[in-house]
Amino acid sequence: MQSMEWTPAARLLALIAGMLTLSSSMLLFPCLTSCFYKVEPHTQKVFKKRRIYELGHGSHILTWSLTMVAGLIAGAQVTCILLLPSMLAWMCFHFSAGGIPHAVLNFALTAALAYFGFVPFPMVPPLEWTPAAIWMAIMALLTVLAALPALVGGKTTDSQYEQTPYLKEQFCDDPEGLLSDVDSGEKAKSYRRARELAWGAHLLGAGCCMAAAIISGGAQDLCLLAALPMTTNGYCHWLRREEHEQEKKGAIFCWIIAAVTLGLGIARVGDQHR
């Protein structure tokens, strides 16, 4: 791992990464899920009260937090700047789900990231295109591209659901659930947009943090940190293999990507110790 200086930007990123890692841990471990909903009660209906969606959400947050750690180690100020779009999307997710206090908190954190990122303006070192950097650059590009349809929403996601109907079940609301809200006298609320924004914010944040780590020369550390959430993402796909055949292929693909990523990280570490 690279040596790092605990600047104000680094401390702020460590705080945000710690909060995200804690959130992901509470979602990944069933015994802690109730604690998560006490902190974020507005997210309970977002996950449709299904364990598989909680695991997927937690796994994506872990991807975001660990890539943020890689960016923090390599270049905190660059990471602060590139993190801004995903933090705004994360704020919109909380607002759409009904978590107004969380949206305000995220706005405050975004303002702090902007200040510590641009003041003073960071100096970027020359980029070395190692095998690890090239591989993670491809991963970062694919991750950001996967986030765009969910962030745009509307007809873009509608066309995506038509091509992959099994995603519609995950993101769109259960009609019976909406009817039960009406029967109980509550105003029916759709959480489809909140789910899309959460998905897009996770992926955009992970892709941007990957880019920050690569730009700052931390591709080898990024490979080591990103391998774990890639593996958990594959596990989430594997759990849905009986529902959709494509999920099984997605799981195998994630595990292959994780193996290659871990191999490049270990290879780079080995080169440094020679």
Image (cartoon, grey):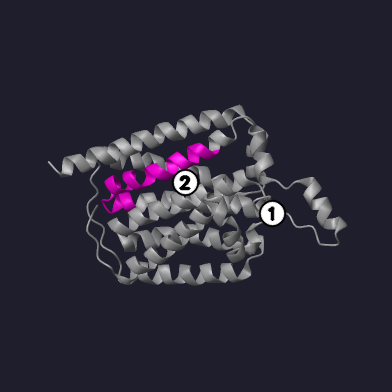
Neighbour tally class for label 2: few under 14, some 14-19, many 20 plus, Cα within 10 Å: many
Left or right: residue 183 versus residue 85 is right
Residue in the picture at 38% in, 42% down: 227
Return the residue nearer the eye: 244 or 214. 244
Residue in the picture at 32% in, 62% down: 76
Where does residue 90 sit, x and y in percent of width and height? Answer: 54, 59
Picture quadrant where residue 271 is located: top left
Q: Is residue 28 above or below residue 164?
A: below
Q: Which residue is mark 2?
A: 144
Residue in the picture at 50% in, 47% down: 59
**Figure quadrant of the C terminus:** top left
| 5 is within the stretch colored magenta | no
Where does residue 259 sit, x and y in percent of width and height? Answer: 36, 34
Neighbour tally class for label 1: few under 14, some 14-19, many 20 plus, Cα within 10 Å: many
Q: Which residues are magenta?
A: 213-236
Residue kind at label 2, given as amino acid type: Val
Return the residue nearer the eye: 165 or 57. 57
Magenta segment, prevailing SS (helix, strand or loop): helix
Mark toward the start of the polypeptide (1 vs 2): 2
Task: Report the disc number at residue 191.
Answer: 1
Residue in the picture at 47% in, 59% down: 22
Dot 2: what SS?
helix
